[in-house]
Amino acid sequence: MLRYLLLLVGILALGACSNTKYLQQDQTLYVGSTVDVNGDILNSEKQDIRSSLSSKSLMTQQPNKKLLATRIKVWLYNQKYNEKKSSWFWNMVLSKRNMEEPVVYDSAKTRESISRMTSYLHNQGFFYATVEADASDKRRKTSVTYKVNTGRNFVLDKITYEVPDSNILAVVQANQNLSLLKKGVAYKSATLSSERERLTRIIRDAGYYKFGRDAVEFEVDTLNKALFRNSLNPFEGFVNIFAENKGREKPTMDVEVRIKNPEDSANATWQRYHISKIYAYPDFPLNGNPNDSTLRQDNRKYITIRSHQDILKPKTLSKSILLRPGETYSLQQYNNTVNKLYDLGVWQFVTLQYRESKDTAHGLDAYLFLTPRRRQELGVNFEVSNSSDYTLGSGVSLNYRHINLAKSATQLSMSLNTGIELVNRQKEGWVLQSREFGGEMGFTWPRFALPFNIRQAARSNVKTRLTFGANYLSRIEKFDITSINLSYGYDWNESLYKRWIVKPFTLNYVGVNLDPNFKAQTVDPNPYLKRSFEPALIGGESVSFIYSNNDLLHQRHYSYFRANIEESGLWLNGINSLVDMATGKRSNIESLTKVNISNFVKMEADYRHYWRLGVHSGLATRIYAGVGIPYSTSSVLPYVRQFTSGGPNSIRAFRLRTLGPGSYKDTSASAQIFPDQTGDMKLEGNVEYRFDLLRMFGGTINLKGATFLDMGNIWMIKKDLTRPGSDFRFNQLYHDLAIGTGAGLRLDFSFFLIRLDWGIPVKVPYYADSNNGWYLSEWNLGDGKWRRDNIIWNIAIGYPF
């Protein structure tokens, strides 16, 4: 079978070379084109222009696709329609999707492409641009080279406004700082189109419900007057008018923005509309009738509710509808109301429609059609597994969710899980190796759950969350671990870009009970396992602030910032003292749990900035700093709160937990098996250049590449005599920094991403044979053993930052 398969591939490859056999005498096969861009612009701009000009919308003739470096589909087309092949084999192979008709070179399409490319360049502000085509014939195959000279592009100079309606003019001037038309900005027709949409949006948002985008016009002018009038492509046929500006280093143009009055009357002006009445249909079916006579009507202070059944408490529904009678119509308030109702999680579809009021002049009646979701969900998951550690593993989890508890949009989630591991031994048969069971319950309220009211913004999207979970894991003849987690906090958006997560109460308890033999023989000799089994009692509070402006207004570059501060021990010590006093100093929390309270403050800051360098590439940067400070009776951070370095999401040229602290290197035998370096402080910086490679499987998977540079380390705040060089000293910062570089591949499935990175060390803090640890002199890429010891492979899900 393999022999026949190779023979078939060989026949197809040879046959694909004769794709010109059946062309007519005056025809040639069009095999491809290249775009050569020259001009007084940046290289990144040239790449963008080259990519745009190669698109199907501008380059009207595209060659046949290649497979295995041959045009097999064209060859198959010839076998069917010219060779007239017909048999069970050929009928199977010659399906429509496997064939392509030969693309015959057409000079008329080349001229059309030149016209479209020139027009596109003019729309980008390159009014002196020229495009020429050079067709090359070889063995009845034609390839085309498009030679593009962009010249200089125009920049905006003076922007003026002609708005006869003083009210509209006031709205425009109040938002002028957000205008896309600014002096010195390169002209693009797309910028005018975007500015038209922006002006339409802000004017409608100010109450002008009937205002349309056609009322916004632009007059573009150079030093000559009245050269262009109101067109998204105003430069067709007028290119030679700009000859007088060719000598200028930066040719400029003036733009006049005109906003016309309504065309139905010479004296008419745009009217501002107000909300008149508000009607809500909380149980509206997809094909429902708003005039259904069986609907019950409940007239409230602000809204009128029409429904067949009570889906949500009227008070809760009224607070979630941000519209109020008498308010000015606002496009932003429309979006806020729809988003607020969706955020409740009660409705599957939310539709808001405005209709002109019959009772009020320039009034609008709002109709909210809400289609509810299923209120309760129940799920069961079964799992069966096998591992080198056990013969058979089985687990069951039960999940329940109620999205509208007590008709208040309160969400209740519950989960229970249990599992066992069995080992099949020759003498004993099936033996239980481990068992686990646990559960979690959580409540989410769509508001601040407080005894007093807090005023919140329309976009705040407040959530109050209370979660409680417990888990028990028992490994027979080894250990029993009991963990309890409890948290209560608030999550809300301060603005479009700012988000807060505040947890005034968190509790994490981990209790460990080791089998005496397992402890003496396995745990005590191994520092990694010994620290991993340390019990912990962490109780405190945390505050996180997140800023992210990744939206349509920041398409070229955007930022992400997260700051977090966590404290443990303050309120827990207070409760401990009260229990101690209440029991006459006979008992307290620490004596009951047999675990000391962890007292510490931990602070973290993570800043990232992303640049889009064209259509298919980008640059991502990151700076991270974190420090944990124990206080009171605690001398070290709890193990689960300490910092680590290295691994797929950190410095990728070093394995996880092998780097640091400082210039310390653990050379013990256990460190080779269980690396476990942690610290009280961490500094890290990353730069990664990302680019697209190719699309596979019809575009469903995007193969991407990356190159990166990582640097950083962890340190101890206090000197650790058992780990010399581990403490942080500012004068040793440069020496202690680790640096690694490398490259990677990403398989992007749209909904998740698989990442493969390989890293190689550039600077190693503990490398003693070079000043400050530079490692480049040790590189020996030709040595297989050196590569195995120094090149680190990382596989992960998602981007590292």
Image: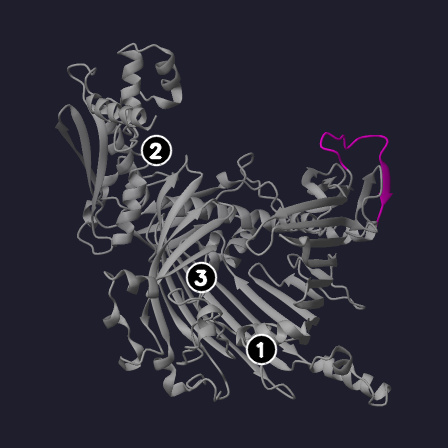
Question: What residue is shown with label 2?
Answer: 57
Quadrant of the image containing the N terminus:
top left
Labelled pair 2, 3 in contact (Cβ < 8 Å): no
On residue 524, the disc is 1
Crowd class of label 1 (few under 14; some 14 to 19; many from 20; radius 10 Å) = few
Q: Nearer the viewer, residue 380 or 62?
A: 380
The picture quadrant where one finds residue 493 is bottom right
Kindly state the secondary structure of the residue where label 1 is placed.
loop
The picture quadrant where one finds residue 596 is bottom right
In the image, is residue 158 above or below residue 733?
Answer: above
Q: Earlier in the sequence, mark 2 or mark 3?
A: 2
On residue 317, the disc is none
Kindly state the secondary structure of the residue where label 2 is placed.
loop
| Marks 2 and 1, how far apart at CA | 70 Å
Residue 288 on the magenta segment = yes
* Three-letter amino acid code of the residue under disc 3: Pro
Q: Earlier in the sequence, mark 3 or mark 1?
A: 1
